[in-house]
Structures are given as structure tokens and as C-alpha cells.
Image (spheres, rainbow, N blue to C red):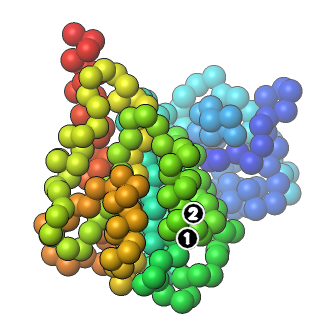
Amino acid sequence: MRQFLAPSMPDTKGNLTLTGKDFKYLHQVLRLRLGDAIHVRLPSGLLQTMAVTAVSGKSLILSPCLGDATQETGVSASQVEKEHSETGPALWLFQFMPKAQKLDLIVRQATELGVTKIIPIMGAHCQKDAAFQRSDRWERIIREARQQSGSPVETVITKPYSLTEAMELWQQAKAENHLGIVLYEKSQDTKCFHQAVAQVQSTSTQERACVAALVSGCEGGFSPEEIETLKKNGFVPVHLETNILRAETATIYGLAVLQNLLTEKSQWLLNEFNC
């Protein structure tokens, strides 16, 4: 675990008292004992190193720790936060709902990538069982993924929307500097990722405010009407020159490529303007 997501803010003395499932997870699963330290992400977003200062049969108390040493091996949450680029874009995922188990996987991996918002969409070719809303499960998956990956991004998943409702949400929330991409299984009248990303403004450090959205389909792909709706809302069809990918593979592949291109472009521009 790279970080623990605190369910509440510490008390006036800076202590965090944990009971119930959180206590069992830290004490019985992670086996934290007196003196052990972990990175704690507070609801405010602050990452703080805290140590176990008291343990009873049903509760555990974490207190602020002056040192940075923890029992963690590998890359720590503090390193993840330090390396997380401030110039990186806010990523949205519009996901046409695949089978429930596949959507669970997509939610987990999108959270690990640092996606800001996940919007499930009920489309013409979605499976019938995909209509079942699993909000509690999705929230639990997001929490576990953030704790494991150390992501500083507070990933949010919405209720399932129709495509029309999702596009209204996009039009209301998108920034002046924005980019919308839809992964399309057909190659006709599509662009490659580099061509699509090139349209993002590159005249100043406004790259910081970029909001990028990826639309990914379910197992049956998109209907012609859905593609036309996405185009009318500014989404650029992009075709992946790869093998035929499963719905969940295509989503994570597309997110990774988009995130990497935009982040590298933003970092390069920032370095240019600072020279």
C-alpha cells in the first residue's frame, strides 16, 4: 500500500482514530504495530506521514510523524506525489458500459492512471447486465486502487448517463483549452493520436488548464448515430493501429497514450517558457 486514505480529518491534536474496517485493514491485514509509519492522504488532499501511537482491541490511533521513514518498500506515495506533474491534464473517461466485471477492471486501472472523472454511458450496443449500477462497489475499487498506487488524484465515478446527458455534462464542464478523443474501431475519416493532440493550444503555459476526455466503447462498439453525436460535440475519432483489442484493453491503452502525449507536451512547453 502506497498510501492510506483517511476517512476523516484528524482531531484538534492532529490524531486520527480508526475503528471498524479501517482498523481491521491496518492492524490485521497490514499488521501495523506501535511505531510503524505510513503515508496518509487526508480528505483535504494533504499527504502526511503518520505513525501508530496507540492500539487497542477495537481501535488504532495515528499521529503526525516528524520523520519520513516508513515500512513501505519500493516507490512511496510521497515520491509519486513529487513526480506527479502539475502540468499534466485533467483526464476524463466516458466509458460505454461493457460487462460488469470488465467495467470493474476499467475503473480500477483508470484510477491507477490518475483519471479525474469516470462517466459510464449506456449506449445502443451495451450489454443488458451493464445497466446494473454498482456505485458502492465502484467506490470501494477506487479507494483500493488509490491506496495501492499512491495516486494524488481524487478519482470520481458518476452514475450511468445516456450519451445525450454525458455530452451535456462535457459541454458544461470543459475548459477553454480542451481535447476530446473517441476510440473508433473503423479507420475511415480518423486521425492518429499525434494529430489529435496537436490541436491543443500551445501558445503559453495554459497547458496546465487542459481538460482531455477519452470516449471508449463497449464490446459492440458504437452505432453510427452515436459517432455522429460525439463528432458534433467536438470529439475527434482516433483509430488504434494495433491488433483487435478487447474493450477493457482498448480503454487503458488509449488512456495511457493520451496521458503520456499530453504530459510530455506540457512539460516540454513549460521548460521552453522557463528558459
Closest to the observer, 250 or 165: 165
State which quadrant residue 54 falls in. Answer: top right
Amino acid type of the residue that numbered disc 1 sits on in the rendered structure: Ser
Q: Secondary structure at mark 2?
A: helix
Check residue 165 in the rendering and tell me which mark sits there, or answer none.
Answer: 2
Check residue 65 in the rendering and tell me which mark sits there, or answer none.
Answer: none
Q: Is residue 38 left or right of residue 80?
A: right
- Measured in 3D between alpha carbons, the distance from the residue under mark 1 to the one under mark 2, in whole angstroms, is 5 Å
Q: Which residue is denoted by mark 1 in the rendering?
A: 162
State which quadrant residue 222 falls in. Answer: bottom left
Taking the view exactly as shown, the residue that stands out farthest to the top is 275
Closest to the observer, 4 or 222: 222
At a point 40% along the width and 29% down the height, the residue shown is: 208
At a point 45% along the width and 72% down the height, the residue shown is: 96
Q: Is residue 237 positioned above or below 68 on the image?
A: below
Q: Is residue 194 positioned above or below 222 on the image?
A: above
Taking the view exactly as shown, the residue that stands out farthest to the bottom is 128
State which quadrant residue 198 falls in. Answer: top left
Circles 1 and 2, Cβ within 8 Å, touching? The answer is: yes
Residue 248 seen in the figure: no
Q: Position of residue 239 (x, y in %)?
A: 20, 65
Q: Position of residue 90 (x, y in %)?
A: 44, 42
Answer few, some or many: residues within 10 Å of disc 2's Cα (few below 14, many 20 plus, some between 14 and 19). Answer: few
At a point 69% along the width and 40% down the height, the residue shown is: 43
Q: Position of residue 49 (x, y in %)?
A: 61, 33
Q: Position of residue 85 (x, y in %)?
A: 38, 32
Amino acid type of the residue that numbered disc 2 sits on in the rendered structure: Glu
Closest to the observer, 123 or 272: 123
At a point 50% along the width and 51% down the height, the residue shown is: 170
Q: Is residue 200 left or right of residue 156?
A: left
Quarter of the image that includes the C terminus: top left
Q: Is residue 209 positioned above or below 95 on the image?
A: above
